[in-house]
Image (tube, rainbow, N blue to C red):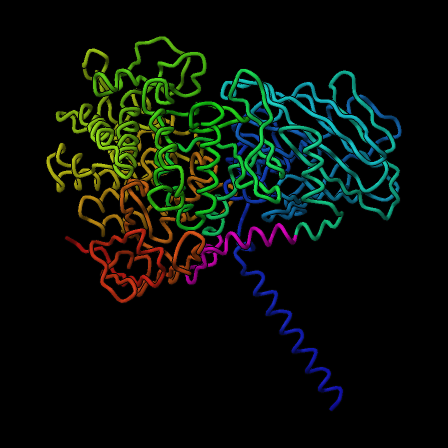
Amino acid sequence: MKNAKKLFGIVLLAIAACSVYAQQSNRPVDLVYPQLDSENSRWIFFSSASRPFGMVNLSPDNHINGDWGSGYRYGVDTIRGFSHLHEWQISGLLVMPVTIPKVIHESLFTDFSSKYSHANETVKPGYHSVLLDRYSVKAELTATSRVGFHRYQFPANSSPGIIIYLNGEIGPCINKSGTLQKQGPRTLKGSVVNAATRRRPKDFMVFFQVDFNTDIKIVEKDPKTGNYLITFDLPADKQLLMKAALSYTSEENAGINMKSELPHWDFDKIVEESQEEWNSMLSRIQIEGGTKTQQQRFYTDLYHSILGRRTISDVNGAYPDNTGSKFLVKQLPCDKTGKPFFNHYNSDAFWGAQWNLNTLWDLVYPEIAEEFVHSLMQYYQDGGMIPRGPAGGNYSFVMTGASTTPFIVSAWQKGIVKEKGEEIYQALKKNHMPGGIMERAGYEFKTAVGGGLKYYIANGYVPYPIPDKNDGFHQDGAGMTLEYAYQDWTLAQMAKALGHSSDYNYFMKRSENYKNLYDPESGWIRPKNLDGKWKTPFDPYQVNNGFIEANAAQSTWFVPHDLPGLAKLMGGNEVAIKKLKQAFDEAKKLGFTSGNSHSQELHPEYSRIPINYGNEPSIQTAFVFHLLGKPDLAQYWSREVVNAAFSGLSPATGYNGDEDQGQMGSLAVLYKIGLFQMNGGTEANPQYQLGSPIFNTVTIQLNQKYYPGKSLTIKTINNSDKNCCILSADFNGNPVREASLSHKDLVKGGVLTLKMGKLSAK
């Protein structure tokens, strides 16, 4: 009996252990598949050993040449090294563990790559492990926000070393003038310059401190490459641990970052803490139902939404200001304890973010939205303009227009940002007027005419081509006109909220400029030249040629602020609905995307797609049906888009084009939970259009610092692939009219119940 009880107790412990494992394996963080779409990735796309919005983005690099097609590439069988920065126009501090031959040959400084196998690789949010075949070294990576942490297991009786690659091409830029010095028996300090690029016009310095858990034997510099080999006398049973802290301000602050974030050598603890941080963020949305693959893809999408954009300020609030003629180190405002009130950020463009980041961050991560508003305003205070995509503490003028206006206005209208409204408004207004960012086309640094703003103001549209000589990209007048008109409308809403009636009327008038490019004969938005003549010949399916990374068929629907007005130009809602349905029928044949990489938008077949969910200009189009009085068609087609474009779970599929630092991941999340905001949540009482959730239950934990409710639950009844349309809806027991809910009601929390059915035949 005693043995039986003992055996029974062991069985119970085993069951409990299995139960705990099962519970842990179903944590949101454990469902993330970081290698999604990694066969098509770009430099900023993949970062495994990273924290949400972390400065450090540590991961293996298979290619290190160029912005596109570099970094971690799943289909390449060779690792070039592990670098710490996979950032918008920034790279640096690539390292590689090696075993040193008896005679060190100079080729080791250039030929240190190693084959590897995915069979010997583990990738999780915040952790990466891989076996380097050439050296038989097991490499493990993790990170805090500003410190990369490495653990290397070398084979017995080998001579361990670390190559530190400071000079040469890494990703989007050339690293140059890289130097390091030994400072103490186990510490290195140094810096490297990121040379200017076409997109980031000034040199930019990265500072670092590297600490090891054992004494450094030799620091050897290769005179030809300027790179370094660090050697050690490492006992056979000892693992080599390395901490690498970064800063964009000084070596001293790199050391402060390390001391603050990683004062110990417990690698497993940092892995656990990284997993906990990711899980805490991902757990803001809990889902029930759907397949295991759908759940994995959902949390991978959500992971992407908070992965791509990066912190550039130090733990003490020091940050790089490169907006002026001279580089400066400045200080963020701090509380009494010395903690900064917000982080400062580097970021790719907010171009298209009105349909993804605005809604997702504002609802689920309002504290992140607020921080980004403060960070964007810091650039204004330093350099006189709110950026649309800052790089290296400076303006990059990436893309076109004033794409941060809707982002900031949305946060204001939802009460996420409550103070300094007048200052914010005047800063935004400056960007919409002569002297502001709308005057500059993509990456236009030396001139300020490529945006065609003077023509937009005087003539009511941006001509194509722009007649003025300039050095900008993306000079596509019809696309610019559509973008400016929408952004003007969003600014008008804030003007009205602050009592600026004349400004409101002025920008509302400008928001109608899209009408000047509607061609009633062809039925499309069509480019005009400066003389007012239509572009001839005109092919609505020809990519670019007046439209930015899009064609006329895609871009014509870019009137999120006045879709009834657009429909009226077309001949009424029914005509517009029929036209849009035909576009979706055609787009479905190509999977709603322009191919599986950004470059394929120029492919003869894919570039002619009428609706493209592989890039931002037409990702709102499913919900155009909603604003034209057919919410059931919005629900039907948004579900079709999810099934075709955002359901794959492999290195070969994912975002089908240009993920742009979390924008497409965010869009996929919104489509899958059934919430969308056509105008980016910028009106006085922001509204959500209800879509087609793919799960039985979605529960969003609301941040009660910002919102009165504790949670918002979306429940579906009779949900299936065929039952993808809402037959009826109620919120907290009250009927929902027109498949829309206001933000102020939604954030009070409660239960939204959706009874689902098939699309009606009519």
Q: Give the range drawn in magenta.
A: 272-296
Side (left or right) of 419 relative to 148: left
Can you give x and y, in whole percent of width and height, for residue 295 in the image?
Answer: 46, 56
Q: Is residue 512 visible?
A: no
Q: Quadrant of residue 76?
A: top right
Side (left or right) of 527 relative to 448: left
Q: Residue furthest top?
A: 469
Can you give x and y, in whole percent of width and height, for residue 347 in the image?
Answer: 49, 32
Can you give x and y, in whole percent of width and height, for residue 84 in the image?
Answer: 64, 34
Q: Which of 756 and 372 is in front in this view?
A: 372
Instruction: Identify the residue at image location x=16%, y=35%.
Output: 565
Is residue 190 placed above or below 49 in the rendered structure? above
Rendered-image quadrant of the N terminus = bottom right
Instruction: Identify the residue at image location x=33%, y=56%.
Output: 746
Is residue 658 placed above or below 285 in the rendered structure? above
Q: Residue furthest bottom?
A: 1
